[in-house]
Image: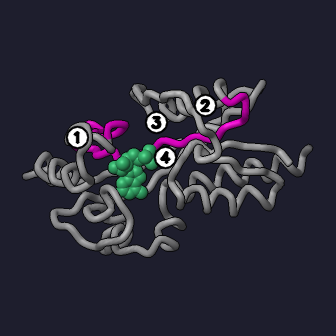
Amino acid sequence: MKEIVIATKNEHKVIEMKKMLEPIGYQVLTLYDFLELPEIIEDKETFRGNAWTKAKTLSDYLNKDVIADDSGLEVFALNNQPGVYSARYAGEDVTYDDNNKLLLENLKGVEDRQARFVTTVCLYRLGKEPIYFEDYLNGTISREYKGSNGFGYDPIFVPNGDTRHLAEYTLEEKNIISHRGKCVQKLIKYLKNEEKVV
Ligand code: IMP
């Protein structure tokens, strides 16, 4: 079995990735499997840069193949902000609600509320060039909050073609259309095809 490390401690991501990677011959390790880990500083200006930094730092340290991802929200009228700063838009150690409030404040009086979620995954394998996968979820930023599922900007994000806010979706519904769900599907498809070739 080939070992691969998923650069996350998010229980949900771990379960999903294991479910998809184990049937195609991978033994999935996560950050919970290591006692010591290097400090990772996500200081790049792009999702790709941050995903690469995470994957490379861990791969160099653990001497293993690594999958790392980075995600965020781009609001077109705000020059694609918060972007890579999505988690800390309102500052360090803030809540999702602080970030949402600031975003709505910054969009006061703005008519164009188009935005998209972005996920980039970096597949970083020893002795190989890194490979990237990217996907999006397009929508608009609402003026009011709705729903209690999900996390982050979900209560103020309305996917295109729907009137429901993302926080009103079940996890299963969200995974089908979400930037992250679709991006991981691309990665799995790539690895499955590679399996067939080898
Ligand atoms: P991460 O790279 O997956 O940790 O995402 C960084 C930040 O982007 C999160 O802390 C959220 O603020 C935002 N974000 C990413 N994906 C989503 C999502 O699916 N819904 C809402 N917010 C998200």
Residue 10 on the magenta segment: no
Residue at mark 4: C-beta within 8 A of ligand 1: yes
**Count of number-bearing discs:** 4
Give how far apart the Cα atoms at labels 4 and 3 are. 7 Å
Reading the image, the residue beneath label 3 is: 47
Label 4 is placed on what type of residue? Thr
For the point 20% across and 52% down, the residue is 112
Q: Earlier in the sequence, mark 4 or mark 3?
A: 3
For the point 50% across and 54% down, the residue is 10
For the point 13% across and 46% down, the residue is 106
Label 3 is placed on what type of residue? Phe
Give how far apart the Cα atoms at labels 1 and 2 are. 33 Å
33 displayed left or right of 115: right
Q: Earlier in the sequence, mark 1 or mark 4?
A: 1
Which circle marks residue 58 in the picture?
2
Q: Earlier in the sequence, mark 1 or mark 2?
A: 2
Which circle marks residue 163 in the picture?
none
Residue at mark 3: C-beta within 8 A of ligand 1: yes
Label 1 is placed on what type of residue? Leu
Reading the image, the residue beneath label 4 is: 119
Colour treatment of the image? one colour
Percent of width and height locating residue 61: 64, 26
Q: Which residues make up the magenta segment?
A: 62-85
Percent of width and height locating residue 138: 39, 56
Q: Residues within 10 Å of mark 4 (few under 14, many from 20)?
A: many
114 displayed left or right of 61: left
Is residue 63 placed above or below 17 in the rendered structure? Answer: above
Residue 121 quadrant: top right
- Of circles 3 and 2, the one toward us is 2
